Amino acid sequence: MTDTLRRFFDSDIWWSFTRSPITMLSAIVALICILGALLAPWIAPHNPFDLASLNLLDAFKPPAWIEGGERAYLLGTDDQGRDVLSAIMYGARVSLLVGLSATLFATTLGVTLGLLAGYLGGKLDALLMRICDVQLTFPSILVALLIDGVVRAALPREVHDQIALFVVIFAIGISEWPKFARTVRGSTMVERNKEYVQAARVIGVSPPRIMLSHVLPNVLGPVLVIATLNLGLAILSEATLSFLGVGVPATQPSLGTLIRIGNDFLFSGEWWITIFPGVTLIAMVLSVNLLGDWLRDALNPKLR
Amino acid sequence: MSGQNPLLEVRHLRVEFPTRRGTLVAIDDVSFTISAGEVLGVVGESGAGKSMTGAAIIGLLEPPGRIAAGEIRLDGKRIDNLRYEDMRRIRGKEIGAIFQDPLTTLNPLYTVGRQLAETMTTHLPITPAEARKRAIGWLDLVGIPAAAQRIDSYPHEFSGGMRQRVVIALALCAEPRLIVADEPTTALDVSIQAQIIALLKSLAREKGTAMMLVTHDMGVIAETADRVAVMYAGRIAEIGPVRNVVKQASHPYTVGLMGSIPPLDRRVERLAQIDGAMPRLSAIPKGCAYNPRCPKVFARCREDRPDLLPAGATQAACWLYAGGAKTHG
Amino acid sequence: MFAFIISRILQALPVMLTVALISFAMFAYVGDPVAIMLGQDFTEAQRQALVKDLGLDQPFWVQFGTFLGNAVQGEFGLSYRLSRPVADLIAERAPATLELAFTAAFLALLIGVPLGVYTGLYRNSWLSRFFLTFSLVGVSLPTFLIGILLILVFAVWLGVLPSFGRGDTVKLGWWSTGFLTWTGIKALILPSITLGLFQLTLIMRLVRAEMLEVLRTDYIKFARARGLPNRAVHFGHALKNTLVPVITIVGLQLGAIIAFAIVTETVFQWPGMGLLFIQSVNQADIPVMAAYLLLISALFVTINLIVDLLYYAVDPRLRIGRGQGAH
């Protein structure tokens, strides 16, 4: 273990990390977002879902540093008197949960299907790649919207509200898997024809084991890069769906939901209700994207 | 060596690559000359610095590589410290270049005629119509059949060997006095290699063009070069007339290199081999770079680095010749 | 050339058929159109009549055939939500979306390509670094937030540009255009920047990446070794090779613009197809969703065809490949 750690700190990746201030800053911002979201129930100043503590007299308070603001509500309050900072922390939780789950889902699905298509080839490969082709013709946000819309139409409203979170995760995940499948399939086909894999096949190692222990490790690098960049995209997709009002249910507001709610008060001057969740969303996505960009360059020796 | 001024003069050239783990010295104190019309072969294993020497001469070292010391003179004029724009006028016009892989050297989106014409109109005071006429002439000269029709073809419509002929035409079309040919036959089929070498040789002779021929193929060198420089770990191990280097090598490395070529005129039980491998640039040993592999190594080799010393008809960077009198026995 | 177009159209057919099948499946199986159309009170006889009327008692493939036949004639039935023919609804709103998308795409290309070339050529200049940072912010900004920020600054604080609607439009036949009135053009500014900014940064990053890739190739090194001036190497040799992959992705991005128009139209209450679609998703208005899906795919397929043709014009290797394939 210590050996692995030492190897990691001696590696080019760690070196390029320490050499890039922007990357380090992104890591810090991402960490703050993740910690703030994870620990929201314990560190948030208020509980925005505790209806008992909400008081309409507290509604529309501006941020603390502006005339009329209160120190208890650092970033102000919304139309219901909810603390914006706390709502953001709880909202980031939902955004991160959906983003991570959708990316994990898309990665698992894409890697599995990509491995199968690349290793087995034949009809399965042809079929899967045709599906990829068709799906990649459409922007992923449109695919996610359609899936969400269809599920919405197919299920009664109460049922849908209960599983809305899973529907969003499913819709975003499904809309992103072809990217992973394409990449993994390509690398798998290259690896499959290398001598060591052929040798493993000759001595009778079973195909699943070859795929898992020989082929998979070799395609993980690019998958990691795509997954990181995809996380940013998934968070954005969720925010977009929620902003359009078809994403997560109103009982579990994400950052996108908060922005949509705040948008109604933009013209009456209560800009903080929508801008602060927006800034949080940007910080989160930007730091994840910067990390992904850096990871891609660090893992791709050609660009160094 | 002839008394006249050399066409190309490389003196104490040093090329460095700054990396995160310190500066790598890719070319270390390399000196040689090429006279007008002369063919200098440069041989050595991959990574010995042959190609990089060529890149330094045409002023196209890949960053972060840079010339750290020494000078390169063309006709007595320094060219290693020219501004980009001044050096650009020399490239193609005074020094032509031929690259290794003809499949990737030509721009796929332009016809060969256009690529030839643009090279000529860049360097020569001629009209586009004249350039086109000359382009056909060049294609004909390098042995492309039906040149007048083929001039409007795209690179992918030619075979590898034919494309290398086009590359040669491109390198020669502004009539440079020196050609730097970097492994011009390595990527080609064996059957085509001889044709391309013969073409290069006859064109160089016909036009009086000097050539620096970088290769790891001793057969090509023996066939083509007047003199040969043997490179090892970024340094010149031995340099001299091709006959002497091939037949009576002085440097133990050259001896080993020649011993590893199968002779055609007699049977041998097994070929000689050199134990070990060329050191990486980050771990070049102290003293003579070859000392860990050298069968004739002695104490001084491990301490001091030898300069090129007269060794019979050639010059060798080897302490065996420190007396100046000793020749290869 | 003609054979090439035909073969591309043939390749596009399965995609269109798949999409049509999905649309039809949505139409036929999601929700219960009969129940929705009849409302609360109906007799069994009424239900039977409607089922027969809609052809729902026919076998699957017959229904699908009828659906296809109707779709080709632009017949998509009635909207559940608005009880008007879907075709009319879409025809009313198509000009708004197309004008918005066209303006956004134009902006994205006009600014994105030169920026990409510049940052690729002068990768270490401080201006390049600035553009690159700006582009990263651009790809990380969700479209709707860009819209909101623009509204906040230009409509709420400065009050110089409208924040919703199309302004005054002029009828040209059935097409209503906002290009011909001053308010129409003013109304177009914020939405088209919102929609185009993401694509702009994407195109810029793409062109830059391709440019860097091409600048590393042997033929560029050889062009330098031949002593060609930088201008010829960069804009003649490098840029043209960069264009080949860029055309493909830019083509796909034009499709994405149409899709993201949904978001922009929502933010700016732009009366286009996207707004219609999102309202339909919200209300489970399947006929509109199905029609929109089919229309969008037809648009994408057309764009892909144009991309292929451009590709064909730029890359001679493709032309020869075709020629040899023919005999």
Image: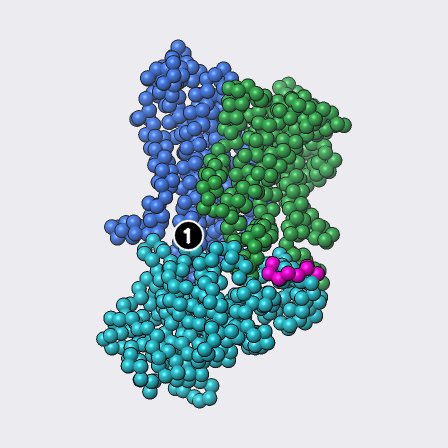
Chain colours: A blue, B cyan, C green
Q: Residues within 10 Å of mark 1 (few under 14, many from 20)?
A: few
Q: Between C167 and A120, which is closer to the camera in this rendering? A: C167
Q: Chain of mark 1?
A: A
Question: What residue sits 57% from the left and 38% below the top?
Answer: C111
Which residue shows up at 31% across the image and 84% down it?
A: B325
From which residue to which does the magenta span run? B122-129
Split into 4 quadrants, where in the image is the C terminus of chain B? bottom left
Q: Residue at position x 38%, y 16% from top? A: A66
The image shows residue C24, relative to residue A5, as above or below, that is above
In this rendering, does residue C6 appear at all?
Answer: yes
The type of residue carrying mark 1 is Arg
Based on the picture, tell me whether residue B85 belongs to the magenta stretch. Answer: no
Q: Quadrant of residue C199?
A: top right
Q: Which residue is mark 1?
A: A304
Identify the residue shown where x is 56% and y is 67%: B176
Q: Position of residue C234 (x, y in %)?
A: 56, 51
Q: Indicate the position of residue C22 as horizontal and vertical percent values.
A: 61, 39
Q: Secondary structure at mark 1?
A: loop
| Residue A33 versus residue B242 in the image, above or below | above
Q: Position of residue C292 (x, y in %)?
A: 64, 33
Q: Residue furthest left?
A: B299
